[in-house]
Image (tube, rainbow, N blue to C red):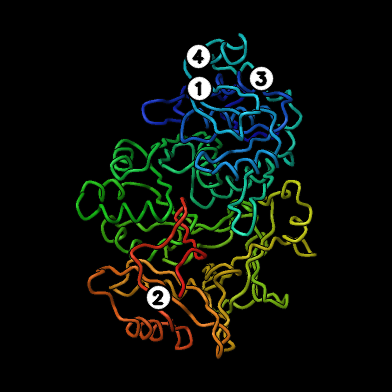
Amino acid sequence: MFSLFPALVGGSVTDRSAVRFGDRSLTYAELAARAGALAARLDGAGRVAVWATPTLETAVGVVAALLAGVPAVPLNPKSGETELGHIVGDSAPSLVLAARGDLLPAPLAALDRVDVVVEAEADTEASGGAGAPGSATPAFSPEASGAVSDPAAPALVVYTSGTTGPPKGAVIPRRAIAATLDALADAWQWTGDDVLVHGLPLFHVHGLIIGILGPLRRGGSVRHLGRFSAEGVARELDTGATMLFGVPTMYHRLAETLGTDPGLAGALGRARLLVSGSAALPLHDHDRIRAATGRGVVERYGMTETLMNTSVRADGEVRPGTVGVPLPGVGLRLVEEDGTTIAWYEADGTPAGTYDGESVGEIQVRGPNLFTEYLNRPDATAAAYTADGWFRTGDMAVLDPDGSVRIVGRKATDLIKSGGYKIGAGEIENALLEHPGVREAAVAGEPDADLGERVAAWIVPLAPEAPPSAEELADHVARRLAPHKRPRTVRFLEALPRNDMGKILKRELPRD
């Protein structure tokens, strides 16, 4: 039978640590009992919303829904009422799961509420008597649900950021979760012996699917920090954690702390794997971490609709600016605006086409890692795929001569057409970050009567009292890339606008 979590069913359930949030934790036996009892209550419930706070209750609630074969809709607790109202109205959950005592906002008031209780009394309280406290066997048998054994059945409905309109609900099937996690296990040599530490939010792919469900599928352990801190990372890596997941904002904070906390360098150096995602990790943070710890930070590439597409492998070369090669089972190609394929990878990893590090194309992917549809949006679903079944990511990239994928920006905001050239904003940002006077950089195109678009840069200088000049930065880029890629407009800021995941919000950059 197809199973997302072999370590939670049958005779494989053990007393090994499964999940820990601060000083609260559950073994596999306890998680099987708690989630199994809750799953019995959810059986046949339809979609369920999960108030996805960074707590043990969220992990138990999502696992329970998956055991029951019920699609879960993770809700961002920081979302405004308008956005929450849209998500609830669009996904139509039958109830909401939340930790006891959580205050829920008005858009959730009309939903039936089920408190997720994970203390010792949870089994009898949550299921009306089913399952004895501490029992190693779930009161609910997942084999009883046909959806659990169907790889195509929906597992999660994860809402996109909604940068071009109201958020869309990407329906993630069970097969996509299994395929991505198994491919990452291959790329990262991820086993049940690994202990993962992170402090990521639990309402999206990175923190929830990769960061919580990933360790559970491997039979390993996860320690969630609750609130990210360099002190917490060091503590967990010093006491047995082997892997760290984070976003660039988190790694930047670690890099900043390394100068004043030598113990942190030792802790990071003991990690088997440091992984960054959700946005590009700036070059200077890469370099500072490697210099202090001897460890390179592995970057990977994915999105809500595709889960993970590529990654630097654990035994591969870590090069800032690249996100590795396609994961096993993922086909990837770069496509020109006219539909011409520049270069591609077959799903078996066979490369073909032009790998020159210069030819820019849109990344399109296909494979078992893809979402099924946008909920209630057949028009958007159809538009997202090509006629021959490839998903249009909207991300622009080049393939380096060694086959590594180097993302240069989003098609909608980061592809600059200037003087007949197609320029990726990401490569200019990376070049700017190599300048010793630049702390952060963002690049976008602006209308230009002569060029069509001109390259514009927003810079956070390392020393605000003595920033590099616009001419110095333009020359710096021209020497490293090409004269037509130099920024023609440079603006200096105290900070770049970013979202919770560290992605730069380019539409919020100030313009004259």
Asked if disc 3 and disc 1 are in contact, CB closer than 8 Å, the reply is no
User: Which sits earlier in the primary sequence, circle 2 or circle 3?
Assistant: 3
User: Which sits earlier in the primary sequence, circle 4 or circle 3?
Assistant: 3
Give me the C-alpha separation between circle 2 and circle 3: 55 Å
Identify the secondary structure beneath mark 1.
loop
Identify the secondary structure beneath mark 3.
helix
User: Which sits earlier in the primary sequence, circle 3 or circle 1?
Assistant: 3
Name the residue carrying label 4. Answer: 134
Identify the secondary structure beneath mark 2.
helix
Give me the C-alpha separation between circle 1 and circle 2: 49 Å
- The crowding category of the residue bearing disc 1, from other C-alpha atoms within 10 Å (few below 14, some 14 to 19, many at least 20), is few
Does residue 308 lie above or below 403 as drawn? Answer: above
Give me the C-alpha separation between circle 4 and circle 3: 16 Å
- The crowding category of the residue bearing disc 3, from other C-alpha atoms within 10 Å (few below 14, some 14 to 19, many at least 20), is many
- In terms of image quadrants, where is residue 387? bottom right
Depth check, mark 2 against mark 4: the one in front is 2
Does residue 252 lie above or below 193 as drawn? Answer: below
Name the residue carrying label 2. Answer: 431
| Residue in view at x 40 percent, y 50 percent | 273
Please name whichever residue, 188 or 115, is drawn nearer the observer in this view of the structure.
115
| Residue in view at x 43 percent, y 47 percent | 245
Depth check, mark 4 against mark 1: the one in front is 1
Depth check, mark 4 against mark 3: the one in front is 3
- In terms of image quadrants, where is residue 483? bottom left
| Residue in view at x 44 percent, y 84 percent | 488
Asked if disc 4 and disc 1 are in contact, CB closer than 8 Å, the reply is no
| Residue in view at x 45 percent, y 86 percent | 482
Q: Quarter of the image containing the N terminus?
A: top right
Residue 118: x and y, percent?
Answer: 50, 21
Q: Would residue 401 be seen by someone viewing this image from the given angle?
A: no
Please name whichever residue, 171 or 108, is drawn nearer the observer in this view of the structure.
108
Residue 40 is tagged as: 3
